[in-house]
Image (spheres, rainbow, N blue to C red):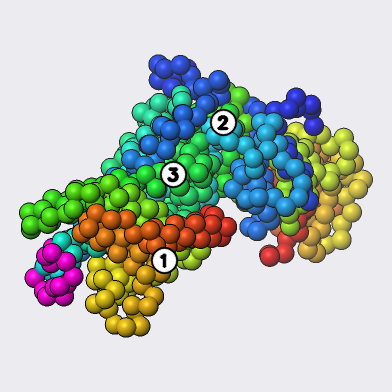
Amino acid sequence: MPALDGKMLRVVSGLSLCAERGQVTALLGANGAGKTTTIECAQGLQKRTAGSISLLGQDPDTAGAGLRARVGVMLQDGGLPPSARPIPLLRHIAGMYQDPWPVDELITRLGIDAFSRTSVRRLSGGQKQRLALAAALVGNPEVLFLDEPSAGLDPQSRQMVFELISELRNRGMGIILTTHLMDDAQRLADYVYIIDAGRNVAEGTVAQLLAHQLPAGAGEQHIRTLLFETRPGLDFTDVLPDGVVVTEARAGSYAATGALTPSDLAALTAWWAARGIMPSSLSLEARSLEDVFLDISGREIR
Amino acid sequence: MTSVPAGALAGNAPPPGPGPGSAPAPLLRRILLQGKYETVTMLRNGEQLILAIVLPLLAMVGLTVTPLLDGLGSSRINVAVPGILALCAMSTAFTGQGISTGFDRRYGVLRFLSTTPLGRTGLIAGKVLAVLAVLFLQVLVVSAVALMLGWQPDPLGWLPGLALLVLGAASFTALGLLVAGTVRPEATLAITNLLWILLGALGGIVIPAERLPAPAQAVVHFLPSGALGQALRDAFLDGTVNAGAVIVLLLWTAVAGGAATRWFKWN
């Protein structure tokens, strides 16, 4: 990783990671992998028993209001009082800061005006998430923690929230999010840590992770997977270039992954034509982060 | 990816985002804000208002129309009112505050607010402030009604009486936080309501020890309810300060406050 000149978050407790300003850093892992524990230690909500954490150069366990004012937190359960109404609640939280984000702008930006007269307990899951995000942002923080930000969001809210997160990143905010949704990480994150059983098992940019375990030289771009079914036991080593990995997951069910080119496809279909092979199914997919995640952390449910 | 139009994020105001603006409001302002917010929340909660105002007023009227307190002081109302003020402190500081803190804990409100500049200490300070503000309103209402019913407090009783109410509120707040921070909110609801009824009836708070069954008489002086009730009666009936009761209340505050600090779970 590049040098971070002190503006970083580092968690060491069986795992080690840092997040930079102007980047979205994702902690990706299955439920119970230790994502929330890790970021709650960084937020000072849980006391760590070992290791060290530096948040904007300070220890979150001993830091005071000065540090808390620079850090915005959106908890997984929201943490908003059920009887409160959105606008008075946001104004109340804004009062804790010297120079808050104007509440009216936040309300418009996150579409909160649509439900401003409804008490928190009557809001839908997505409305609660948007309000919790507003509450995390109202202090105009330099670092933003988001614990499962897209939980309960409908597609429109998700788009709204993702666009806002991207903009904030572009303005230099350091954003740390946890998620078990590959799609979140793939769409938002500049750098991803895959967490499993309290350890980080893989890390890198989304492109790097997508190229994970592929032969060197496969490149990071345009990774595709060609899925096809035909007669079992075929050997494609002479047909496809070295950068493309072919696996036969079930008998006759093949997946060829790599930086596939049009000539690779032409070579493959020509090879089939020469042998009179007609696949029973054929599809081309982008390799997803989900595949990487499952490759690394195993496919069993825990 | 389309680019975002300039100003979409912030309207015409200076662009928000990371910058030197991320500073906390001054400590005192944060605490006052939280105190005000919690006070309004308490006053808007109907169940809490019944517990804080309606039931104490009903108890006061009940004690003046029954002969329960006859012979203990110059008049029924004079004996009744100090105990009712003590009951008000128990309603707000112990039961009301305990229940709201218990549910705030369940919903993660305590955790969220402790990540803002308010912090844990500011949060507790705000709650204490809200208890004092509601107690002040209770004293105003109860005293006004009591004066209309013919209450004649010893003028020398006001200063020690108000100080004792604050001390009583401190011990009951510590006890309420101890319960709210260690058990589930449903259990907090049950425990604090049950204790309010038990201590209200038999804890020496509105009915002095000498009118209670013999087994209760032995212990009520050592309970925060009995100590506060008796100290307030001594203050408003005779203008005296009951040092023993003050020590009992200080001990309860220290022990419950220490235990709450040690065992309070924020999540």
Residue that carries the numbered disc 1 in the rendered image: B188
Q: Are marks 3 and 2 on the same chain?
A: no
> Is A17 displayed left or right of B90 in the figure?
right
Q: Chain of mark 1?
A: B
Q: Name the one closer to the observer, B76 or A75.
A: B76
Q: Position of residue A20 (x, y in %)?
A: 69, 30
Residue B191 shown in magenta: no
Considering only vertical position in the picture, is A40 above or below A302? above
**Mark 1 to mark 3 CA distance (whole Å):** 21 Å
- The answer to whether residue A233 is seen in the rendering is yes
Residue A286 falls in image quadrant: top right
Of residues A211 and B109, the one nearer the viewer is B109
Q: CA distance from mark 1 to mark 2?
A: 34 Å
Badge 1 amino acid: Thr
Check the image and report above or below for A40 versus A69: below
The chain to which mark 3 is attached is B
Q: Mark 2 falls within which chain?
A: A
Residue that protrudes farthest toward the bottom in the picture: B214
- Disc assigned to residue B83: none
Query: Which mark is drawn over residue A66?
Result: 2
Q: Earlier in the sequence, mark 1 or mark 3?
A: 3
